[in-house]
Amino acid sequence: MISGLIPIFANSNYEVYFHQPNFEPVPGMFVSPTGKFEIMFPDKPEQSSQVIRLTEELGNTTLYTFTYSNNDATYMVSYCEYPTIYIENVDKKIMLKNLKDGFEGNLSLNNDETEYITLQGYPGIHFKSKNNEYCVDMMDFIVDNKFYQIGILRSNHYPDSATDKGFFESLTFMKEY
């Protein structure tokens, strides 16, 4: 159903939990040491990656995606790195808006709601969009030189369950391990 939206390219070089002094993951919390985030998926997500072209000038980057799908929804987190020199010289609100607009355009979504947000001091954008097939509740963030996209895709209605709320509210960006 919804999981077909995200191309899957398996990458087996991934550890869900990592060990460090004074680090104790919350049971059920998904931790990405390379992605530097943690979030509470409803169950263990699948990982995929693909090389994408940013622009001719910026070159390629790898997009890492983590998804969990059930009969009702797809939960996803994706991230990629941009060249630091680009991130340092771009208006973050414009970049977030352009990324949101590109996502909506690629999936033929109509925007119902958009607001600029922050999480842990990092700039972000929250938007709800839909088409005839599904409703999407997304949050995008720029953290250092990484772009993150966190979202839930659901048929027939916007995400509204306690699990959906917990997914978004559990997101944490990690600085050091």
Image (spheres, rainbow, N blue to C red):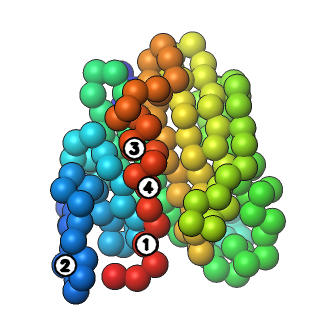
Examine the rendered structure and indicate whether residue 3 appears above or below residue 36: above
Mark 4 in CB contact with mark 3 (< 8 angstroms): yes
Quadrant that contains the C terminus: bottom left
Of marks 2 and 1, which one's residue comes earlier in the chain? 2
119 vs 55, nearest the viewer: 119
Mark 2 in CB contact with mark 1 (< 8 angstroms): no
173 vs 82, nearest the viewer: 173
Q: CA distance from mark 1 to mark 3?
A: 16 Å
Examine the rendered structure and indicate whether residue 87 appears above or below residue 12: below
Amino acid at pointer 2? His
Q: Residue at x 58, y 60 (%)?
A: 119
The image quadrant that residue 3 belongs to is top left
Mark 1 in CB contact with mark 3 (< 8 angstroms): no
> In what element is the residue under mark 1?
loop
Q: How many marks?
A: 4
Of marks 1 and 3, which one's residue comes earlier in the chain? 3
Q: CA distance from mark 4 to mark 2?
A: 19 Å
Instruction: Kindly identify which residue carries mark 2.
Output: 19
Instruction: Kindly identify which residue carries mark 4.
Output: 171
- How many C-alpha atoms fall within 10 Å of the one at disc 4: few (<14), some, or many (≥20)? some
Amino acid at pointer 4? Leu
Amino acid at pointer 3? Phe
